[in-house]
Amino acid sequence: MVIYKFHSIEEYLKKGDIQGTLLLSEGNDRNQQLGALAESADVRVRHITRAELNRICSGKKHRGAALVIDNLSISGSGQRAHRRGLKRNFSEYLDALGGESALILFLDSITDTGNLGAIIRSADQFGVKLVVIPKRKTAGETEAVIRTSAGASAYITIVEVANLVQAIKECRKYGFWIYGADLAGELLPDIVFADKSGLVLGSEGSGLSRLVKENCDYLVSIPAAGHVDSFNVSVAAGILMYEITRQQGFYSS
């Protein structure tokens, strides 16, 4: 994967748990700053010509820098994460959470990169522990998603699973209550969320798939008085994440 937006590169280097190469074609102050961050993160730095960088970035606009990430890998059981601490299976991610309160986000067929990036950006702000996406019918963690998330994807554990329903069932075994966003659900102000909550969001077009909906403990809707059917999925995600984490005491001092 090639990232060429300055702030996204900066956040990934600050996080420091990637394997890759920082490519620089210009020696301005900002790129020197990236070079220093790369050295601190033990990331290789290569100086190349602007023509070479243009080719690597496929002609997309850059500022003389690009980060090529190598370690986006798939575990033996089909989960994917871009971290050095890749787990063998999904349950190991749940084991790592311990017994504390947590919010896990499940994304069912979110295919728009802008929505996925915006959701990840909000998830980082609300302290979401895991973002779980299916291998198929999803936008995936592309450069466009990283750019839209403003680099927040560097701080979120994003796990790709072969079967979203099975991942939801596994979470329930660990004591999580699963809440699905649905227009026909109970109103948000009427729901008391669990300390261990899983929030499932579906695509704007078709919403939650049938099997995913059947495996939710509750369906929840957001009160609205507008003229169109619903909120944009990334906006809905932000509203729901705020209320869940508020009830979990995320903001208490």
Image (cartoon, rainbow, N blue to C red):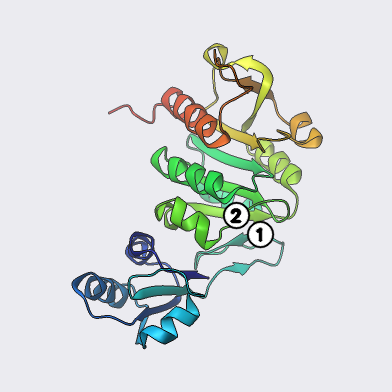
Which of the two discs, 2 and 1, labels the residue nearer the N terminus? Answer: 1
Query: Mark 1: which secondary structure?
Result: loop
Q: Residue 124's quadrant in the figure?
A: top left
Mark 2 crowdedness (10 Å alpha carbons): few <14, some 14-19, many ≥20: many
- Residue 162 screen position, x and y as percent: 74, 55
On-image quarter of the C terminus: top left
Mark 1 — residue? 79
What residue is drawn where x is 38% and y is 64%? 5
**What whole-number distance in Å separates the C-alpha atoms at marks 2 and 1?**
6 Å
Rendered location of residue 183, percent (x, y):
67, 21
Q: Position of residue 207 (x, y in %)?
A: 70, 33
In the displayed structure, does residue 113 sit left or right of residue 136?
left
Confirm whether residue 119 shows in the render: yes
The residue lying toward the viewer, choosing from 150 and 194, is 150
Q: Could you tell me which residue is drawn at 50 percent across and 49 percent down?
A: 117
Q: Secondary structure at mark 2?
A: strand
Q: Amino acid at mark 2?
A: Val
Using the image as rendered, state which of residue 99 and residue 157 is in the foreground: 157
Residue under label 2: 159
The crowd level at tag 1 (other Cα within 10 Å; few <14, some 14-19, many 20+) is: many
Q: Do residues under tags 2 and 1 come within 8 Å of each other at their CB atoms?
A: yes
Three-letter code, disc 1: Gln
Nearer-the-camera pick, 123 or 54: 54
Specify whether 203 is left or right of 155: right
Going 55% across and 16% down the picture, which residue do you hit?
Answer: 226
